[in-house]
């Protein structure tokens, strides 16, 4: 009897060990996959950053700096005023991202003005520093801290803006390519632009249908919810405001006859902006400028370089300085309230 009990215990321990091994394998395999995916993602990010830096270095060697300085002197006061107004339009669109998302998520204690300020400051900082997922969430945390907003909600706001941005980019490029096949040759595409345009528009339609019911996306330990189609469309309108305003800033500083048609230039600008975001280089430096210069076939033209420099001053540097000032004031105000709190 004792031998049978001993044998039974040994079998039970063996089965338990097998079950533990299977559980460990089932647990370890996803971790291994996640680790490999993380390594590939980091490698791709580093590769894109190196490519962007290389493009920036190449562009600097191609610029006629004497001509660039002379071109800067030709900029008029009306051009500067229009650029300032266009920059305000762009950041009104960026601020709308947060207003729409916060209103839909019904986040407590956050007014529309507070959400707009958080969004504008977050993009003013992240557009300059880069890594918008990280910097955008950190800046928003400063403005939403007192409201007790969780990390998952912050990341949902950032995710929603990203989805809307890329849908808008794909839709704009798709519409322009579908209507004007010549744009494909300008962008150096080896295949028919109409086919690419229809494919992009179809992908946008499928994604919008997929979003129509709201989806859950796992990001590490956080579960993020996508916004429904109606809300995403509102954010796409915000993205369109941003892109139109930003493209206008560059367009008015380019010399006459270089930009070509408004539609083709806008398509080129949208592609350059998308590549700048993907590069993860601070401000998309190099990737954006390189795409614009190559797309306009403006190698070595100092007046184009001058336009890009002034564009950066209005669209990147000035918003960053203002956003940094607002962020410092917000942090100091929070510390002051915490210091005098009972």
Image (cartoon, rainbow, N blue to C red):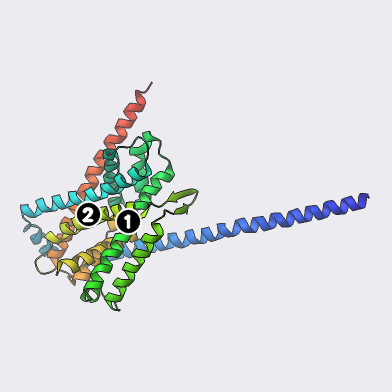
Q: Eyeballing the image, is 174 above or below 93?
A: below
Which residue corresponds to mark 1?
164
Quarter of the rendering containing residue 76: bottom left
On the rendered structure, is 310 left or right of 161?
A: left
Is residue 28 found left or right of 266 in the rendered image? right
Of the numbered discs 1 and 2, the one sitting upstream in the chain is: 1
Looking at the image, which residue sits at the far top?
342
Q: Residues within 10 Å of mark 2 (few under 14, many from 20)?
A: many
Residue 112, horizontal then vertical, whole percent: 28, 40
Q: Look at 6% across and 59% down and name the residue there.
A: 74
- Which residue is situated farthest in the bottom direction here? 191
Mark 1 packing: few (<14 Cα in 10 Å), some, or many (20+)? many
Task: Give whichever of 155, 314 is nearer the camera.
Answer: 155
Q: Secondary structure at mark 2?
A: helix
Distance in Å between CA atoms under marks 1 and 2? 12 Å
- Which residue is at a point 60% across and 57% down the rendered structure image? 28
Residue occupying image coordinates x 29% and y 44%: 99
Q: Which residue is mark 2?
A: 241
**Image quarter hosting the C terminus:** top left
Where is residue 287, by image quadrant? Answer: bottom left
Q: From where the camera sits, is residue 110 visible?
A: yes
Residue drawn at point x = 29 percent, y = 56 percent: 236
Q: Is residue 53 visible?
A: no
Element marked by disc 1: helix
Q: Is 16 rendered above or below residue 51?
A: above
Disc sitting over residue 60 in the figure:
none
Residue 57 placed where, x, y %?
Answer: 26, 64
Residue 337 drawn at (x, y percent) = 33, 27
The one of 165 and 321 positioned closer to us in this rendering:
165
Q: Position of residue 13 (x, y in %)?
A: 79, 52
């Amino acid at each position: 009897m004792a031998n049978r009990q001993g044998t039974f215990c040994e079998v039970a321990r063996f089965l338990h060990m097998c079950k533990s091994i299977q559980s460990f394998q089932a647990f370890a395999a996803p971790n291994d996959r996640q680790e490999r995916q993380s390594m590939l993602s980091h490698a791709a990010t580093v590769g894109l950053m190196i490519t962007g830096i290389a493009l920036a270095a190449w562009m600097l060697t191609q610029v006629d700096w004497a001509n660039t300085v002379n071109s800067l002197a030709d900029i008029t006061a009306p051009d500067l005023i229009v650029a300032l107004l266009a920059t305000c339009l762009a950041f009104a669109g960026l601020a709308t991202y947060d207003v729409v998302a916060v209103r839909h998520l019904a986040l407590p204690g956050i007014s529309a003005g507070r959400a707009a300020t958080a969004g504008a400051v977050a993009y003013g900082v992240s557009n300059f520093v880069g890594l918008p997922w990280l910097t955008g969430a950190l800046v928003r945390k400063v403005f939403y801290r007192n409201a007790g907003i969780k990390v998952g909600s912050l990341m949902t706001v950032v995710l929603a803006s990203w989805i809307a941005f890329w849908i808008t980019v794909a839709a704009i490029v798709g519409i322009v390519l579908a209507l004007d096949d010549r744009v494909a040759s300008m962008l150096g595409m080896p295949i028919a632009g109409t086919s690419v345009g229809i494919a992009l528009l179809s992908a946008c339609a499928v994604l919008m249908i997929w979003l129509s019911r709201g989806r859950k996306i796992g990001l590490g330990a956080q579960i993020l919810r996508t916004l429904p189609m109606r809300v995403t469309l509102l954010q796409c309108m915000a993205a369109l405001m941003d892109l139109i305003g930003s493209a206008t800033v560059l367009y008015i500083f380019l010399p006459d006859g270089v930009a070509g048609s408004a539609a083709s230039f806008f398509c080129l600008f949208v592609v350059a902006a998308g590549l700048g975001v993907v590069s993860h280089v601070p401000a998309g430096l190099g990737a954006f400028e390189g795409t614009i210069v190559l797309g306009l076939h403006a190698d070595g033209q100092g007046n184009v370089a001058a336009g890009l420099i002034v564009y950066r001053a209005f669209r990147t540097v000035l918003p960053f300085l203002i956003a940094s000032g607002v962020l410092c004031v917000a942090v100091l105000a929070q510390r002051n309230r915490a210091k005098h709190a009972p």
